[in-house]
Amino acid sequence: MSSESQPEASVIELASVTPESAKDTRDAPAGSDTLAVQNWMELLSPYQYSRSSAHTPACSPGLRSRSNSSVGRSSFTVDDRRRSSSGSRSSQETYDVPVEDAVSEISQRLKPSREIIQELTIEVMPALLVSVAGSVFAGYVLGRIQESRAFEQLPALFIMVAVLLNLKSNIELNMSTRLSTLANLGVFSMRAEGINALRSNMELLLLQSTIVGTSVGLIASVLGFSKWSALIKETGVLLGIGLGCSVIGSAVIGVLISATVVTSHKFGVDPDNIGTPIASSFGDMSTLLILGMVSTVLVAVMDTLWPAVAVVGFLTLGGFLLRVVRANHQMAHHISEGWLPLVYAAVTSSIAGVIVERCAERFPGMPPLVPVVNGIGGNIGTVFASRMSTSLHRLHGRYIADEHNLVMLILLLINIPIQMGFLSMRQYFDPALQLNLGFLLAYTLATVVHGLAMLLIGKFACKYLWARGYDPDDYVNPFITGTGDMLGTILLALVFLVVF
């Protein structure tokens, strides 16, 4: 039976098959009721059966099953979809695997509901708490650096902050989801392949950060234009600040993401659960700290050639990285992919910033809540999208409906106590906020609507992108964060309008 002619199982069928029903088929006559065994075997990672497939997880081979009831075994043919350098299809390899071993392996991979709930609570909640602390600290750092001499001399830096944080954060989130997918596909179980994956993704991240830094510098210089006589000098300084902050910050966060994914995988923690919240929280903090330092240094020497030297140096590094990434056939396609969602995220986040600015004078208690509402909602959305993308890669485009619906529910419920805890802390440190029951109810409803919207966007965007041949790891995060920033800000503004 060819892989193209094998029966396709629906999501419900995959979710409803049990290990017991799969075991019952081993004594059945050949050709009868083998769909359950076949579908259960397709849930297995191909790394269990194909030595060659482990080297290219993005092109995972398909598995095909034939019943062999006489010996209680199933024969699985590995259909390697990769082509050799001559263009011919690689030969197939066949392995005989005992059904009992296959069912045992599947039972370990498909976790019961209680274990999923425990895993999400233990792993995701601490990561979200860290992200809340990171958002609060990032807001404090932003307030400090905006009072610095560099921002007074170069007002265009105020324009740069929002765009830089958004674009840089999203390329780092994309790296986190890519590495989490590779970790769950077993790449980091092989030392050489794991090191190669880390190096390749770091090179891509630094190249993308060079593009982001250049773009942000040019946008800030155009939108912050004041007078022609200072245009060239200010553009050079803004380019240097944008490039320096983006490249140095991405290098720091890239190392942190790599360490997080490798360490969590080593100790049995799912990197999909913690990678994106860690990248998001520490990414904003490091970006603002580095922005403060780089801007202080370059503004102090803006009348010299040092800003130009910095720009030339970073652009040279970008050119070198472009050649390196283009020479890597597994990563070259990422250079041109995923930029449209980044533009979308930058535009929607800018709209959210305008809304906050318009509401800040009337509702002074609103701006401090915006980063937390948007941050937590965006983080649960990216966590779910990261898990969904991993599932699509692992199961060759399929996913387990019941499991993902449960994950959505648990993430939505985790969101509520964290939001309430933050509000309580905010009230304790700032009694002027004047929280009342009406505000608490409206705020809770807004955060639930926001979180649910992020989860649904993550779910349907992953399915839509995968069905059309796009890798969700490269596209879905900016859609979630961009839409989340705008929707969360609008919902929070409505809460203040209704209650106050």
Image: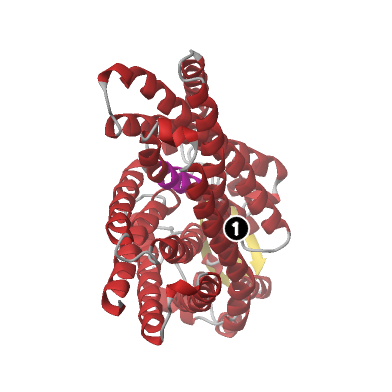
Query: Residue 80: x percent and y percent?
Result: 51, 48
Residue placed most toward the observer, 477 or 190 = 477
Instruction: Classify 130 as above or below 316.
Output: below
Q: Is residue 171 magenta?
A: yes
Query: Does residue 89 lie above or below 498 as drawn?
Result: above
Residue 339 in the image: above or below residue 459: above
Tag 1 residue: 184
Q: Residue at x 35, y 80 (%)?
A: 442
Q: Residue at position x 31%, y 49% from top? A: 350
Instruction: Give the percent coordinates (x, y) of residue 380.
Output: 48, 66
Residue 157 sits in which quadrant?
Answer: top left
The answer to whether residue 488 is seen in the rendering is: yes
Say which element carries label 1: helix
Q: Is residue 369 left or right of residue 69?
A: left
Amino acid on which the number 1 mark rests in the picture = Asn
Q: Is residue 337 left or right of residue 326?
A: left
Q: Residue 289: horizontal and vertical position, in percent? A: 56, 42
Please give left or right for residue 235 compared with residue 281 in the image.
left
Looking at this view, is 78 or 280 the one in front?
A: 280
Residue 177 versus residue 397: which sits nearer the camera? 177
Give the magenta part as a residue range.
Answer: 164-172
Q: Quadrant of the N terminus?
A: bottom left
| Residue 87 visible in the snapshot | no
**Which one is in front, 182 or 224?**
224
- Confirm whether the magenta stretch covers residue 349: no
Residue 451 placement (x, y as % from top left) = 40, 71
In which quadrant of the rendered image does the C terminus lie? bottom left
